[in-house]
Image (tube, rainbow, N blue to C red):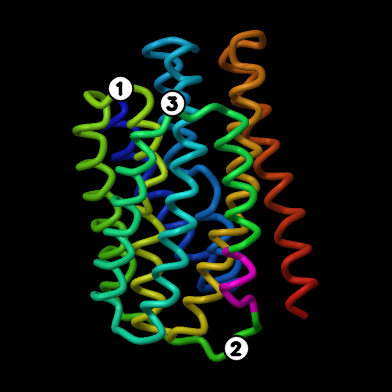
Amino acid sequence: MILSFKLIITPLLIGLITLVGRRWGTALSGFLIGLPLTSGPISLILAMQYGPEFALQSAIGSLAGQISLCIFCLVYYFTSRKYQWPTSVVISTISFLVTTAIFNSISWSFELALLILVLTTGAVSQVIPNQPTSSKITKPPVWDLPARIIIATVFVCLLTAVAHRLGPHLSGLLAPFPVFSLVVSAFTQHQDGVDSTARLLHGIVVGSIAYAGFFLIVIMYLVSFGIPITYTLAVLTALCVSGISLYVSRDQAA
């Protein structure tokens, strides 16, 4: 069920993010990637298949996993200043996996995961610049969008194939695996340069605030409110927080 869902939703999401980035810039694209585009659907399906308690434990892991994503963005930013996109992809992916392995040995509570995620988001967003980039639009090649869709879908399918065997904690930690972040960052660095990549990564990191808002609602209300109401509220919360964060971030960059 998760695999079928991912095969449908992944091409739609990566296509939407790509087109939004081309129309309104990499900053907005980054904010969209920062939303729980993979973790949210996984959490919903886990709740339906395995029950609220399993989904709650996975949600706590997902909050901790988003810290790994922020570290991924930080590493990608620094490597992209010195190396081409293949090296940036490899080093930043290794940083995510190493951080995840370390975090898997920690017994995370909701409060600890949320606190460290908020602190990490604030610190990393200060390091990665959010300065305006050139308004020049690079026309992508014909194969660009299909390649992004195929690469992202393959990543998601590979992750989905093993996630159900890992249990709620490790599944939650791996749920924020930077599928969209890797694909879009690599293509942005290759086509538009390091400044646009930095703006994209900044948006992804700040988008973690909306990500935290989503799972905050899930953890607080899933048991008492049930699946439909909780996940509806979680989506609305994430969208509202993302909109506010984007407005504040653009105002600061102006």
The residue under label 1 is 167
**What residue is drawn where x is 34% and y is 44%?**
102
Numbered tag placed on residue 247 in the rendering: none
Report x, y in % for residue 7.
29, 40
Residue nearest the viewer, comparing 45 with 117: 117
Q: Which residues are magenta?
A: 124-130
Numbered tag placed on residue 58 in the rendering: 3
State yes or no: discs 1 and 3 in contact (Cβ < 8 Å): no
- 232 lies above or below 84: above
Amino acid at the residue labelled 3: Ser
**What residue is drawn where x is 36% and y is 77%?**
79
Amino acid at the residue labelled 2: Ser
State yes or no: discs 2 and 3 in contact (Cβ < 8 Å): no
- 202 lies above or below 109: below
Relative to residue 158, is residue 245 drawn left or right?
right
Report x, y in % for residue 226.
60, 11
Relative to residue 28, is residue 236 drawn left or right?
right
Between circles 1 and 2, the one closer to the viewer is: 1
Numbered tag placed on residue 135 in the rendering: 2
